[in-house]
Image: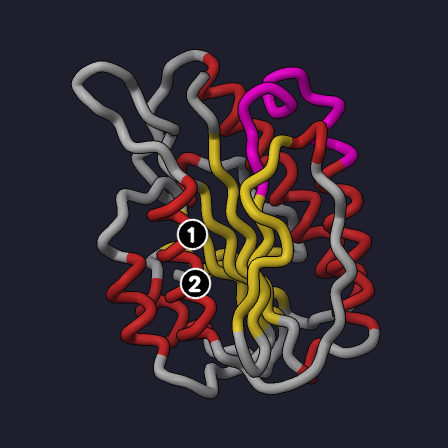
Amino acid sequence: MRRLPVYLLLDTSGSMHGEAIEAVKVGLDTLVSALRQEPQALETAYLSIITFDSAAQVLVPLTEMGAFQVPSIEANGTTALGAGLSLLADRIGTEVAKSTPEAKGDWKPLIFLFTDGIPTDSWQSGLAELKKHSLGSFVACAAGHGADSALLKQITPDVVALDTATSTAIKAYFKWLTSTVSARSQNVEKGQKDTGGLSELPPPPAEVNVVL
């Protein structure tokens, strides 16, 4: 069976402490419970969570929705986005099945990067590693005024922004993320390719602004 890999690359640096990180936890719970109610997502979507603060770590490797357990998440440290991108590239290379002459591999991964700050390490080297892989939609979210949407535009052309990193805004973002994964899982069931880009995704809610 061809899987739809979904990677969440989440900023868990110290600036996310408090309301923001609690809203992310609620968002993840909502995402997982909602996708379990969707037959196509339950069958095809596999989810991984990678976090980055002073270092990057895999909290959950690529896991089917039925078996997914929302991990415990804490916020502290700096913003090692480059390490996060490098680890993401490594996991995609390890976990996502490539097509062979005999069999189709997994669908192109969906990637959602969420950050509220400025990278404190070299993100360019991590991005170079990530670009070696074939990706589907890659959406970066700049949460609040501490994030740099122009920098994120250098990582992916598809950037959205939240005016504030409040629980209301973050929950709206995760609700949109849920509908995006749901829509993509339905499309792959129909055999539709993901050419990438926000135009392929459901329109975001009012709290989520597309950065042009």
Residue 42 within the magenta-colored segment of the rendering:
yes
Local secondary structure at mark 2: helix
Residue 138, percent from left and from top: 41, 50
Vertical comparison of 128 with 61: above or below: below
Spatial CA span between label 2 and label 1: 6 Å
Residue 113, percent from left and from top: 51, 59
Residue drawn at the location 21% of the way across and 24% of the way down: 100
Residue drawn at the location 58% of the way across and 86% of the way down: 78
Residue 1, percent from left and from top: 45, 16
Q: Return the mark for residue 87.
A: 2
Three-letter code, disc 1? Arg
- Which quadrant does the C terminus fall into? bottom left
Stretch in magenta: 33-47
Disc 2 residue crowd, few under 14, some 14–19, many 20+, Cα 10 Å:
many
Q: Which residue is mark 1?
A: 91
Horizontally, residue 173 falls left or right of residue 89, namely right
Residue drawn at the location 43% of the way across and 58% of the way down: 88
CB atoms at circles 2 and 1 under 8 Å apart?
yes
Vertical comparison of 190 with 65: above or below: above
